[in-house]
Amino acid sequence: MQETENKNNKESSYKKALLKSGLPFEYEVCNYLRKNRFIVDFEYPYIKDDENGTQKEFSYDLAASYISIDHYLDFQIECKYKMEPDTIWCFLPNETAYMQDINSTSFIHEVDAFCKKKDLLKHTSDFPSLAPICIKGVEVYSKDQANEKTIVQAAYQLSGSFTEKIIDAFYHEINLLLVKDTIFYQIPIIVTNANLYLLKTDITTDEIKKSDSIESIAQNHNILLYTPHIDLIQKNKNFQNLYSFLINLPQKTIKDKFKTFTKDIQHFSEVQSKLPRLIAIVHWDKEGKNLQELIDYVKKYIWPTQEIKDMLLEKAKEREEQIAKIRRKK
Protein backbone atom coordinates (compact mmCIF):
# COMPACT_ATOMS: atom_id res chain seq x y z
CA MET A 1 0.00 0.00 0.00
CA GLN A 2 2.79 2.37 1.01
CA GLU A 3 4.76 1.41 -2.10
CA THR A 4 1.78 2.20 -4.37
CA GLU A 5 1.28 5.54 -2.65
CA ASN A 6 4.96 6.48 -3.10
CA LYS A 7 4.79 5.51 -6.77
CA ASN A 8 1.70 7.68 -7.31
CA ASN A 9 3.35 10.62 -5.56
CA LYS A 10 6.44 10.24 -7.73
CA GLU A 11 4.35 10.16 -10.92
CA SER A 12 2.34 13.16 -9.77
CA SER A 13 5.55 15.01 -8.93
CA TYR A 14 7.11 14.67 -12.40
CA LYS A 15 3.86 15.71 -14.09
CA LYS A 16 3.59 18.84 -11.97
CA ALA A 17 7.24 19.75 -12.48
CA LEU A 18 7.06 19.24 -16.23
CA LEU A 19 3.84 21.19 -16.68
CA LYS A 20 4.95 23.96 -14.34
CA SER A 21 8.02 24.54 -16.50
CA GLY A 22 5.70 25.64 -19.32
CA LEU A 23 7.77 23.68 -21.86
CA PRO A 24 5.00 21.25 -22.95
CA PHE A 25 2.63 24.20 -23.36
CA GLU A 26 5.09 26.06 -25.61
CA TYR A 27 5.56 22.88 -27.64
CA GLU A 28 1.79 22.41 -28.04
CA VAL A 29 1.32 25.97 -29.32
CA CYS A 30 4.40 25.62 -31.55
CA ASN A 31 3.10 22.42 -33.14
CA TYR A 32 -0.27 24.02 -33.85
CA LEU A 33 1.43 26.90 -35.67
CA ARG A 34 3.75 24.64 -37.65
CA LYS A 35 0.75 22.63 -38.85
CA ASN A 36 -0.66 25.92 -40.16
CA ARG A 37 2.31 26.84 -42.39
CA PHE A 38 4.22 28.90 -39.81
CA ILE A 39 7.99 28.76 -39.47
CA VAL A 40 8.55 28.61 -35.71
CA ASP A 41 11.67 28.98 -33.59
CA PHE A 42 11.86 28.52 -29.83
CA GLU A 43 12.88 31.69 -28.01
CA TYR A 44 13.90 34.99 -29.53
CA PRO A 45 16.77 36.33 -27.39
CA TYR A 46 17.66 40.01 -27.04
CA ILE A 47 19.76 42.23 -24.79
CA LYS A 48 18.33 45.04 -22.69
CA ASP A 49 18.93 46.74 -19.35
CA ASP A 50 17.27 45.21 -16.29
CA GLU A 51 15.75 47.24 -13.44
CA ASN A 52 19.26 47.94 -12.09
CA GLY A 53 20.57 49.26 -15.41
CA THR A 54 22.65 46.14 -16.03
CA GLN A 55 22.63 44.61 -19.50
CA LYS A 56 20.93 41.23 -19.42
CA GLU A 57 19.61 38.69 -21.90
CA PHE A 58 15.83 38.42 -22.15
CA SER A 59 13.66 36.45 -24.57
CA TYR A 60 10.11 35.64 -25.60
CA ASP A 61 9.01 32.05 -26.15
CA LEU A 62 8.10 31.60 -29.82
CA ALA A 63 9.14 33.47 -32.97
CA ALA A 64 6.58 32.43 -35.58
CA SER A 65 6.76 33.69 -39.17
CA TYR A 66 4.10 33.46 -41.86
CA ILE A 67 5.39 34.48 -45.29
CA SER A 68 3.17 35.01 -48.32
CA ILE A 69 4.26 36.74 -51.53
CA ASP A 70 5.30 40.25 -50.40
CA HIS A 71 4.07 40.14 -46.80
CA TYR A 72 6.09 38.93 -43.82
CA LEU A 73 4.02 38.30 -40.69
CA ASP A 74 6.13 38.15 -37.54
CA PHE A 75 4.11 36.65 -34.68
CA GLN A 76 5.96 37.27 -31.39
CA ILE A 77 4.52 34.92 -28.79
CA GLU A 78 4.88 34.60 -25.04
CA CYS A 79 3.27 31.49 -23.52
CA LYS A 80 1.92 31.42 -19.95
CA TYR A 81 0.77 28.08 -18.58
CA LYS A 82 -1.06 28.21 -15.24
CA MET A 83 -1.14 25.11 -13.04
CA GLU A 84 -4.42 25.96 -11.32
CA PRO A 85 -7.25 25.32 -13.81
CA ASP A 86 -9.44 28.10 -12.41
CA THR A 87 -6.80 30.83 -12.76
CA ILE A 88 -8.35 34.12 -13.90
CA TRP A 89 -6.79 37.07 -15.68
CA CYS A 90 -9.09 40.01 -15.01
CA PHE A 91 -8.74 43.34 -16.83
CA LEU A 92 -10.14 46.85 -16.81
CA PRO A 93 -11.82 48.12 -20.00
CA ASN A 94 -9.78 50.74 -21.88
CA GLU A 95 -12.50 53.32 -22.43
CA THR A 96 -10.17 56.00 -23.83
CA ALA A 97 -8.46 53.87 -26.50
CA TYR A 98 -10.18 55.83 -29.29
CA MET A 99 -8.59 59.05 -27.98
CA GLN A 100 -5.18 57.47 -28.58
CA ASP A 101 -6.20 56.41 -32.10
CA ILE A 102 -6.22 52.77 -30.99
CA ASN A 103 -8.74 50.28 -32.37
CA SER A 104 -9.18 46.55 -32.79
CA THR A 105 -6.54 46.28 -35.53
CA SER A 106 -3.84 48.12 -33.58
CA PHE A 107 -2.12 44.94 -32.39
CA ILE A 108 -1.12 44.42 -36.04
CA HIS A 109 1.92 46.68 -36.39
CA GLU A 110 2.83 47.35 -40.01
CA VAL A 111 6.51 48.15 -40.64
CA ASP A 112 6.50 49.66 -44.13
CA ALA A 113 8.38 52.99 -43.94
CA PHE A 114 10.87 51.84 -46.59
CA CYS A 115 8.39 49.97 -48.83
CA LYS A 116 6.95 51.21 -52.10
CA LYS A 117 3.94 49.03 -51.44
CA LYS A 118 1.88 50.20 -48.48
CA ASP A 119 -0.47 48.58 -46.01
CA LEU A 120 -3.89 48.80 -47.63
CA LEU A 121 -6.08 49.62 -44.62
CA LYS A 122 -3.78 51.41 -42.15
CA HIS A 123 -5.74 50.64 -38.99
CA THR A 124 -9.08 52.04 -40.03
CA SER A 125 -11.56 52.07 -37.15
CA ASP A 126 -14.24 50.89 -39.60
CA PHE A 127 -12.73 47.41 -39.79
CA PRO A 128 -14.78 44.76 -37.92
CA SER A 129 -13.72 44.35 -34.30
CA LEU A 130 -11.88 41.25 -33.07
CA ALA A 131 -12.12 41.73 -29.30
CA PRO A 132 -12.52 44.38 -26.58
CA ILE A 133 -9.58 46.62 -25.72
CA CYS A 134 -8.44 46.43 -22.11
CA ILE A 135 -5.85 48.02 -19.82
CA LYS A 136 -4.29 46.92 -16.52
CA GLY A 137 -4.91 43.37 -15.39
CA VAL A 138 -4.39 41.08 -12.44
CA GLU A 139 -4.01 37.31 -12.09
CA VAL A 140 -6.38 35.77 -9.53
CA TYR A 141 -5.92 32.22 -8.22
CA SER A 142 -6.50 30.03 -5.14
CA LYS A 143 -9.71 31.92 -4.35
CA ASP A 144 -8.11 34.91 -2.61
CA GLN A 145 -4.60 35.14 -4.10
CA ALA A 146 -3.67 37.79 -6.67
CA ASN A 147 -0.53 38.57 -8.66
CA GLU A 148 -0.18 41.89 -10.48
CA LYS A 149 3.20 41.05 -12.01
CA THR A 150 2.39 38.03 -14.22
CA ILE A 151 0.64 39.94 -17.01
CA VAL A 152 3.01 42.93 -16.86
CA GLN A 153 6.06 40.64 -17.10
CA ALA A 154 4.61 38.76 -20.07
CA ALA A 155 4.00 42.05 -21.89
CA TYR A 156 7.47 43.25 -20.89
CA GLN A 157 9.07 40.19 -22.53
CA LEU A 158 7.38 41.10 -25.82
CA SER A 159 7.79 44.88 -25.78
CA GLY A 160 11.50 44.75 -24.89
CA SER A 161 12.55 43.59 -28.36
CA PHE A 162 10.01 45.56 -30.39
CA THR A 163 12.24 48.38 -31.63
CA GLU A 164 15.04 45.94 -32.40
CA LYS A 165 12.63 44.02 -34.63
CA ILE A 166 11.49 47.24 -36.32
CA ILE A 167 15.09 48.14 -37.15
CA ASP A 168 15.72 44.64 -38.48
CA ALA A 169 12.64 44.90 -40.72
CA PHE A 170 13.77 48.31 -42.03
CA TYR A 171 17.19 46.86 -42.82
CA HIS A 172 15.52 44.08 -44.84
CA GLU A 173 13.31 46.58 -46.68
CA ILE A 174 16.13 48.97 -47.56
CA ASN A 175 18.41 46.22 -48.85
CA LEU A 176 15.65 44.06 -50.40
CA LEU A 177 16.95 41.03 -48.51
CA LEU A 178 13.77 39.13 -49.38
CA VAL A 179 14.38 39.91 -53.09
CA LYS A 180 11.21 41.95 -53.56
CA ASP A 181 9.52 44.87 -51.83
CA THR A 182 8.05 43.31 -48.67
CA ILE A 183 5.86 44.72 -45.90
CA PHE A 184 6.70 43.41 -42.43
CA TYR A 185 4.09 43.07 -39.68
CA GLN A 186 4.86 42.66 -35.98
CA ILE A 187 2.12 40.91 -34.07
CA PRO A 188 2.73 40.47 -30.31
CA ILE A 189 0.63 37.77 -28.63
CA ILE A 190 0.33 36.23 -25.17
CA VAL A 191 -1.15 32.71 -25.21
CA THR A 192 -2.38 31.40 -21.88
CA ASN A 193 -4.66 28.76 -20.42
CA ALA A 194 -5.87 31.28 -17.83
CA ASN A 195 -9.50 32.34 -18.16
CA LEU A 196 -9.85 35.89 -19.50
CA TYR A 197 -12.34 38.32 -17.96
CA LEU A 198 -13.12 41.98 -18.58
CA LEU A 199 -14.68 43.89 -15.68
CA LYS A 200 -18.01 45.48 -16.47
CA THR A 201 -17.99 49.19 -17.18
CA ASP A 202 -18.48 51.38 -14.10
CA ILE A 203 -18.21 48.43 -11.70
CA THR A 204 -17.77 49.45 -8.04
CA THR A 205 -15.91 47.87 -5.14
CA ASP A 206 -19.24 47.53 -3.33
CA GLU A 207 -20.71 45.54 -6.23
CA ILE A 208 -17.68 43.25 -6.19
CA LYS A 209 -18.09 42.67 -2.42
CA LYS A 210 -21.72 41.68 -2.93
CA SER A 211 -21.10 39.52 -6.02
CA ASP A 212 -21.42 35.72 -5.84
CA SER A 213 -19.38 34.88 -8.96
CA ILE A 214 -16.87 36.42 -11.34
CA GLU A 215 -19.50 36.20 -14.10
CA SER A 216 -21.73 38.67 -12.22
CA ILE A 217 -19.08 41.41 -12.34
CA ALA A 218 -17.09 40.56 -15.47
CA GLN A 219 -17.53 39.06 -18.92
CA ASN A 220 -15.56 36.03 -20.10
CA HIS A 221 -13.65 36.40 -23.40
CA ASN A 222 -11.56 34.12 -25.59
CA ILE A 223 -9.44 37.05 -26.82
CA LEU A 224 -8.64 40.45 -25.34
CA LEU A 225 -6.51 43.28 -26.73
CA TYR A 226 -4.24 44.56 -23.97
CA THR A 227 -2.77 48.07 -23.79
CA PRO A 228 0.77 47.66 -22.42
CA HIS A 229 2.57 50.26 -20.32
CA ILE A 230 5.86 51.28 -21.92
CA ASP A 231 7.85 53.08 -19.23
CA LEU A 232 9.91 56.21 -19.89
CA ILE A 233 13.22 54.37 -19.65
CA GLN A 234 12.13 51.92 -22.33
CA LYS A 235 10.68 54.69 -24.52
CA ASN A 236 13.94 56.66 -24.33
CA LYS A 237 15.96 53.55 -25.18
CA ASN A 238 13.65 52.74 -28.09
CA PHE A 239 13.93 56.31 -29.38
CA GLN A 240 17.73 56.38 -29.13
CA ASN A 241 18.15 53.07 -30.95
CA LEU A 242 15.75 53.86 -33.78
CA TYR A 243 16.85 57.47 -34.21
CA SER A 244 20.50 56.42 -34.31
CA PHE A 245 19.74 53.84 -37.01
CA LEU A 246 17.79 56.31 -39.17
CA ILE A 247 20.06 59.33 -38.79
CA ASN A 248 23.07 57.27 -39.89
CA LEU A 249 21.44 56.09 -43.11
CA PRO A 250 22.68 57.71 -46.34
CA GLN A 251 20.65 60.83 -47.17
CA LYS A 252 19.82 59.35 -50.57
CA THR A 253 18.18 56.37 -48.85
CA ILE A 254 16.06 58.68 -46.71
CA LYS A 255 15.14 60.85 -49.69
CA ASP A 256 14.31 58.00 -52.07
CA LYS A 257 12.89 55.29 -49.80
CA PHE A 258 11.62 56.79 -46.53
CA LYS A 259 7.89 57.03 -47.27
CA THR A 260 5.75 57.46 -44.19
CA PHE A 261 3.46 59.90 -42.37
CA THR A 262 6.35 62.34 -41.76
CA LYS A 263 9.77 63.22 -43.14
CA ASP A 264 10.89 64.28 -39.67
CA ILE A 265 13.08 61.41 -38.42
CA GLN A 266 12.91 62.62 -34.82
CA HIS A 267 9.12 62.78 -34.83
CA PHE A 268 8.90 59.37 -36.49
CA SER A 269 11.26 57.84 -33.89
CA GLU A 270 9.24 59.36 -31.04
CA VAL A 271 6.02 57.81 -32.32
CA GLN A 272 7.60 54.40 -32.92
CA SER A 273 9.25 54.40 -29.47
CA LYS A 274 5.82 53.97 -27.84
CA LEU A 275 5.13 50.63 -29.52
CA PRO A 276 3.57 48.12 -29.21
CA ARG A 277 0.18 49.81 -29.24
CA LEU A 278 -1.67 46.64 -28.26
CA ILE A 279 -0.82 43.03 -27.40
CA ALA A 280 -3.35 40.30 -28.20
CA ILE A 281 -4.05 37.91 -25.31
CA VAL A 282 -5.54 34.57 -26.36
CA HIS A 283 -7.09 31.90 -24.14
CA TRP A 284 -5.71 28.55 -25.29
CA ASP A 285 -8.25 25.82 -25.97
CA LYS A 286 -7.19 22.28 -26.86
CA GLU A 287 -8.22 22.63 -30.52
CA GLY A 288 -6.50 25.99 -30.96
CA LYS A 289 -9.77 27.60 -32.15
CA ASN A 290 -9.16 30.93 -30.41
CA LEU A 291 -5.65 31.30 -31.79
CA GLN A 292 -6.97 30.35 -35.22
CA GLU A 293 -9.64 33.05 -34.93
CA LEU A 294 -6.91 35.61 -34.32
CA ILE A 295 -4.78 34.31 -37.22
CA ASP A 296 -7.80 34.42 -39.57
CA TYR A 297 -8.54 37.98 -38.46
CA VAL A 298 -4.98 39.10 -39.21
CA LYS A 299 -5.14 37.52 -42.67
CA LYS A 300 -8.52 39.13 -43.33
CA TYR A 301 -7.04 42.51 -42.41
CA ILE A 302 -3.93 42.13 -44.56
CA TRP A 303 -5.72 40.46 -47.48
CA PRO A 304 -9.29 41.87 -47.26
CA THR A 305 -12.05 40.42 -49.39
CA GLN A 306 -13.86 42.56 -51.93
CA GLU A 307 -16.88 42.55 -49.59
CA ILE A 308 -14.81 44.12 -46.80
CA LYS A 309 -13.28 46.67 -49.19
CA ASP A 310 -16.76 47.67 -50.38
CA MET A 311 -18.00 47.97 -46.79
CA LEU A 312 -15.07 50.19 -45.80
CA LEU A 313 -15.55 52.35 -48.89
CA GLU A 314 -19.24 52.77 -48.07
CA LYS A 315 -18.47 53.80 -44.47
CA ALA A 316 -15.86 56.27 -45.69
CA LYS A 317 -18.44 57.83 -48.04
CA GLU A 318 -20.98 58.07 -45.21
CA ARG A 319 -18.42 59.83 -43.03
CA GLU A 320 -17.57 62.31 -45.80
CA GLU A 321 -21.27 63.08 -46.26
CA GLN A 322 -21.70 63.69 -42.52
CA ILE A 323 -18.71 66.05 -42.50
CA ALA A 324 -20.08 67.87 -45.55
CA LYS A 325 -23.46 68.37 -43.76
CA ILE A 326 -21.75 69.83 -40.70
CA ARG A 327 -19.76 72.24 -42.88
CA ARG A 328 -22.91 73.36 -44.72
CA LYS A 329 -24.62 74.14 -41.40
CA LYS A 330 -21.73 76.38 -40.45
Image (tube, rainbow, N blue to C red):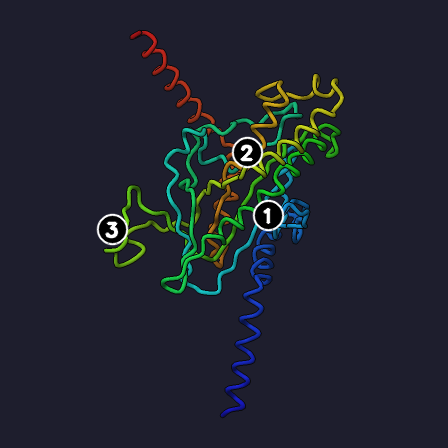
Give the crowd class for mark 3: few <14, some 14-19, many >=20 residues within 10 Å. Answer: few
At x 60% / y 56%, what residue is drawn?
31
Residue linked to disc 2: 274
Q: Earlier in the sequence, mark 1 or mark 2?
A: 1
Report the residue at 59% width, 44% height from top: 75
Q: Are marks 3 and 1 in contact (CB under 8 Å)?
A: no
Secondary structure under tag 3 reads helix
Q: Secondary structure at mark 1?
A: loop
Q: Please name the residue that numbered disc 3 is placed on.
A: 207
Mark closer to the chain start, 3 or 1: 1
Mark 1 vs mark 2, foreground winner is 1
Categorize mark 1 by other alpha carbons within 10 Å: few (<14), some (14-19), many (20+): few
Residue at 36 percent across and 14 percent down: it is 323
What separation in Å lies between label 1 and label 2 (alpha carbons)?
19 Å
Q: CA distance from mark 2 to mark 3?
A: 35 Å
Query: Foreground residue, 236 or 121?
Result: 236
Kind of residue sitting beneath label 1: Glu
Q: Which residue is mark 1?
A: 51
Image quadrant in which the C terminus is located = top left
Q: Is residue 76 above or below residue 81?
A: above
Q: Amino acid at mark 2?
A: Lys
- The alpha-carbon separation of the residues under discs 3 and 1 comes to 37 Å
Q: Position of residue 256 (x, y in %)?
A: 71, 17
